[in-house]
Image (tube, coloured by chain):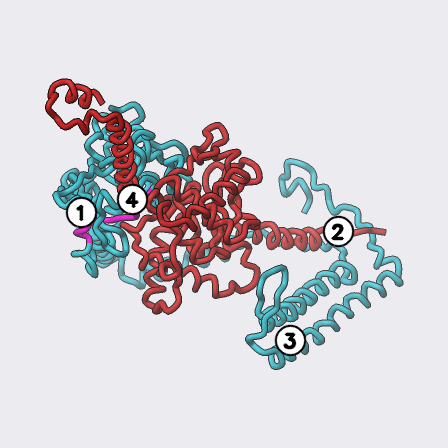
Amino acid sequence: MSDKELDLPVPDPGLEEHPPRFTDVDPAAADRSYRQIVAMLAAVPVLVIAFLVVYFAVPRDAELILFGSTFKMQTTLLGLTAGFATLLIGIAAIAWARSLMSDEEIVGERHGAASPPEARERVLADLEIGIDASAIRRRKLLGTGMAGALGMMLLPAVVSLADLGPWPTAEERAKTIEKTIWAEGVRLVTDVTNVPLKATDLVVGQLVNAQPENLEHLEDSAEYQIAKAKASIIVVRMDPNSIKIPESRRDWQVDGILCYSKICTHVGCPISLWEQQTHHLLCPCHQSTFDLGNSGVVVFGPAARSLPQLPITTDAQGYLVARGDFTVPVGPSFFERDSLKDFQEGDR
Amino acid sequence: MRFLARGGRSSKDRTSLRRHRAARPVLLLLSLFLVGATYAAVSPATESVADGAADAQLIAQGKALFSQNCASCHGLGGEGLAQQGAPALTNVGAAAVDFQVSTGRMPMANPLVQAPAKENTFTEDEIAALAAYVASLGQGPAIPTEDQYNPAGMSPEDVSRGGELFRTNCSACHNFKGAGGALPNGAVAPSLQNATPKQILEALRTGPGQMPIFAEGALPDENAKQVIAYIEQVNAVPAAGLSLGGLGPVAEGFWAWVAGIGSLVLFAVWIASRGARA
């Protein structure tokens, strides 16, 4: 076909000039390349036999120390022999194609993609016969009935989407994601060991990963993980003179013992990387950093909201207890969440 | 003193003993003794001072070592120097000194973000003397005894509980395997690979550098020992092959991208290149 028939915007440059390779013009170079390829292929059986020998002869618990790391002798040698054998086969194949196989470019012509007109007409005629034979033209309700039946089958699939969860109305949110099991008088206990915390037991610079005492009642139930994921806290004690405590939060703490949600306000990772001297709390997932010496405001990273602080006090026996639930929802933002009540730098 | 004088004026018929020339000096001495005795009884730090001559000698030796090795930054009395960034040592206790000096962190060679662990050049006796001196300056955790930290004889349940405690309290900084990790502003949480049980317990109780304190109230000795048993067990299991620091996906990903994909790219370039022509 000529360029006119193909309607190309620029003329077809054709095949570029084909300079011969060294191996095409110099028989010595071709022989050298030939010997290299055969040598590589001949090394493969040697490596395979070495693999078999290692498999049977090297004890499984033998160890090898390389670059200061300990390796299992057998697996290392098996990997090296099998790996190099595979690699040599690959390199030999490529070298063969590059230096000894003909590398002349060949043009393969193709016919057009559309079928010839007579074939297309025959298919349409066959289709017409099929539709007539199905009786759908004379008994019209067959087609309508089938379409309606299939359409109705979509309904169960759509309706069962309701199982994805309750519709997040304001009332529903207040009962679920905007609430934790913290309540007035609930003691702060250590995570894992459930030991109640006394204010006098905590020293300045101390960090405790804690949770509500009433979480223990939920153990082994489905709600346990949900409740723990929302109610986990960290308790820290700082020198009250070295931190900023706003007027509105003066009675949220006990002598510099402050309690914060452990769930990052960015995407909800648990955070407990707390620097004692800077009072900064760093989230390991995306490096959001909160200043626990300043009501949990964000000092770095992608988090948009301060870390929620849990108001605490002591009970009659001196144990740390919550004064109520968190005043704002814990964890990451969601579409309907109101951010007006979150603490911001400068709030009193 | 004024009440004595007034008392002397108002009642002339009191015994002459009170008017004796020695009355004032004797009373002064008695009251000084009383104040001293009360202070000694109330203050626990000086209690240990009063323990015996051996202690006093140890403290004196520690004070000499302190003046030579520590005082240039921490001050002659351990009061700290803010402009050097050196904290006061008056209430850090003996455990902090034992940890910092035995791991070679102190004395620092030069002021950095954080004191790096290095070879310790002090003998055990010298560390004990330094610790005794710093402990005498105020209150603070004492050097733990072997039964507090030796994890020998812990059951598999204890080790498992220790693992739970480690993952809850320590892994955020020290990595789930105790390999350590990065902290903000160039600081690092060190690897626990070479930490001794004693040093681990001392670090928990004293909170060196940016590390928070994990005091007995929330983490009793029994739990701390479980954590130590877990770390010992993890350290005893060798990592297979190149661990790349055991730091997780960053180091491994770097290796896979640079060495793995890099060599694949080189092969692809070789396969597609036209090579030399005649």
Asked if the magenta segment contains residue A202, the reply would be: no
Circle 4 residue: A234
- Numbered circle sitting on residue A187: 1
Circle 3 residue: A51
Q: Are marks 1 and 2 in contact (CB under 8 Å)?
A: no
Viewer-proximal residue among A174 and B34: B34
Q: Return the chain for callout 1.
A: A
Identify the residue at image location x=65%, y=54%. B263
Q: Is residue A147 left or right of residue A94?
A: left
Q: Colour of chain B?
A: red
**Label 4 vs label 1: CA separation?**
13 Å
**Disc 3 marks which amino acid?**
Phe
**Disc 1 marks which amino acid?**
Arg
Viewer-proximal residue among A154 and B3: B3
Residue A282 appears at what percent x and percent y?
39, 40
**Label 2 vs label 4: CA separation?**
63 Å
Q: Are marks 4 and 1 in contact (CB under 8 Å)?
A: no
Residue B21 appears at what percent x and percent y?
26, 25
Front of the two marks 1 and 2: 1
Circle 2 residue: B274
Q: Is residue B278 left or right of residue A44?
A: right
**Label 3 vs label 1: CA separation?**
64 Å
**Label 3 vs label 2: CA separation?**
35 Å
